[in-house]
Amino acid sequence: MCGIVGLHLRDPELYPQLGRLLETMLCQVVERGPDSAGVAVYGDRRRCPEGHAAVSVLVPAGTDFGVLGLPELLVTEAGDTTVLAAPVSPDALVAAVRTALPDATVVGSGTDLTVYKGTGHPRALAETYDLAAAQGWQGLAHTRMATESAVTPEGCHPFSVGPDQCLVHNGSFANHATIRRELIAAGHVFDSENDSEVGARFVADRLAQGEDLDKALRLVCERFDGFYTLLVTSADGFAVVRDAIACKPAIIAETDRWVAMASEFRALADLPGISDARIYEPEPERVYHWQRSIPLQGQGVTA
Amino acid sequence: MTSTLETTVVDLATTSVRELNAELHAPKATHYAVEHPQGAHAIAAGVATPITVDVRGHAGYYAAGMNDGGTITVHGNAGTGVAENMMSGTVRVTGDASQSAGATAHGGLLVVEGSASMRCGISMKGVDIVVGGDIGPMSAFMAQAGRLVVCGNAGADLGDSIYEARLYVRGTVGSLGADCVEKEMRAEHLAELAELLTAAGMAHDPAEFRRYGSARRLYHFAAHNTY
């Protein structure tokens, strides 16, 4: 199974409500994956202040972040995940983490993105992440019914393997081992045995080569066999695609104020203005892609 | 639950679906209204008596599943598997229906006033389905009996591996699935289509439809099907 919810806000007046809306959506897909949950929030300036980079990490308990040698480091502990933010570039912060904390797993990085992963009941995890108080312009969440690898924080979605990028997946890829070998041969390093990470690394690889989200996802349809409903986000994009058989559910709702996607309608039922929304199911192998228009890319919310 | 002379109102904001369905399985009234469905699953599943149920809002998975004699209306959209395995009665969706509407249903009438998504009527076994709008790809897959009427367009692979069942489509067909072919529209087909459209409350002229069904070439093993 697995549950997916995502919300892309068009109306900045809703930015302060992003976390609360996303938490309500997440709690409606608990039954689709009650063992673990991951969340991504774009533009939460509580945890990734303006001019900072944020890196989300899974680290052993009691890790001393002082070894990073960053005096202005902002540390937010949220269960299994710790979010580190500092006024440096994302690459510099990731490099510092990898050098000073070799046991850490980086599960997200960027100038706008904070990622949280953990095992446990999704409702409790939402509290651990303090999701209801999160602000921002875009977010997504995933509840995982594990099939291809163990229930661990590393196995949680979203998979965020490129700057400000996230991928969540409902389904299972059949030929992920083949594509994993190709990506490893091309120099990619994997953090988990999860099939969905292969999808995320494939998309990140295409984006790094200059293709846009739309093209990258059309290439996913060409290369990957198996079942998938994917929600993929980037620094300024929000996209949905399903495989040719499309047996993994997905529903999209749009209003002038937001675009929302979920596994089931009940996750959308409490969104403001849902009664006037355009509601539809994405067609097989068609990429649905929204680009952030306002405000300018990179701007977020100051709490 | 609040009752008036005619209607018992069940508010799912304060009552569980389990409580609702327990009441509908041993009904003390003949007409029920369900408020605040909010996409909950299995609303009014397993109704086995000729009661009337009006669901006022969007329903989730398997709404009116296994209906046997009830008249159930979803005033909104319905999720996956609306009226799946219906035996008899009428289920109407005033909005759109998600995947697998009327799956495996043996009898009764399912009306979707809007459009139905993929796999509408999959493995249908005698149900009549009338869709006011379009149906998605892979509809009537392995259909065994019954009638499917589509007033709009049908998606790709219509009627793939169909055994029997008669498919009437007013608009375009994305493509026909394996062993599904267009068939002649004879007087008896126009007559039954007129009846179905009337029963569903649709005003289209039967002459605007085309009929599709099984070529019956997959009933037996054939050497050319070997790999």
Image: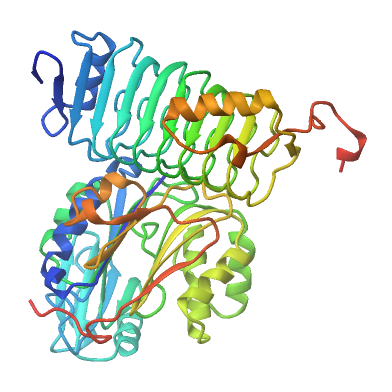
Q: How many dots with numbers?
A: 0
Residue drawn at x 16%, y 86% is A50
Above or below, A266 against B10 in this view is below
Instruction: Report whether A53 appears left or right of A262.
Output: left
Confirm whether residue A193 shows in the render. Answer: no
Q: Residue furthest toward the right?
A: B223
Instruction: Report whether A146 appears left or right of B24.
Output: right
**Colour treatment of the image:** rainbow
Closer to us: A127 or A150: A127
Closer to us: A290 or A225: A290
Residue drawn at x 21%, y 85% is A299
Q: Quadrant of residue A88?
A: bottom left
Confirm whether residue B171 shows in the render. Answer: yes
Residue drawn at x 54%, y 28% is B194
Instruction: Report whether A251 appears left or right of B117.
Output: left
Q: Residue B68 in the image: x percent, y percent?
A: 41, 14
Above or below, B201 against A68 in this view is above
Q: Residue B101 in the image: x percent, y percent?
A: 47, 34
Q: Quadrant of residue B191?
A: top right
Closer to us: B17 or B52: B52
Indicate the quadrant containing the C terminus of chain A: top left, top right, bottom left or bottom right: bottom left
Above or below, A264 against A178 in this view is above
Indicate the quadrant containing the N terminus of chain A: top left, top right, bottom left or bottom right: top left
Q: Residue B14 in the image: x percent, y percent?
A: 10, 30
Q: Residue A217 in the image: x percent, y percent?
A: 51, 70
Q: Quadrant of residue B179?
A: top right
Closer to us: A42 or B92: B92
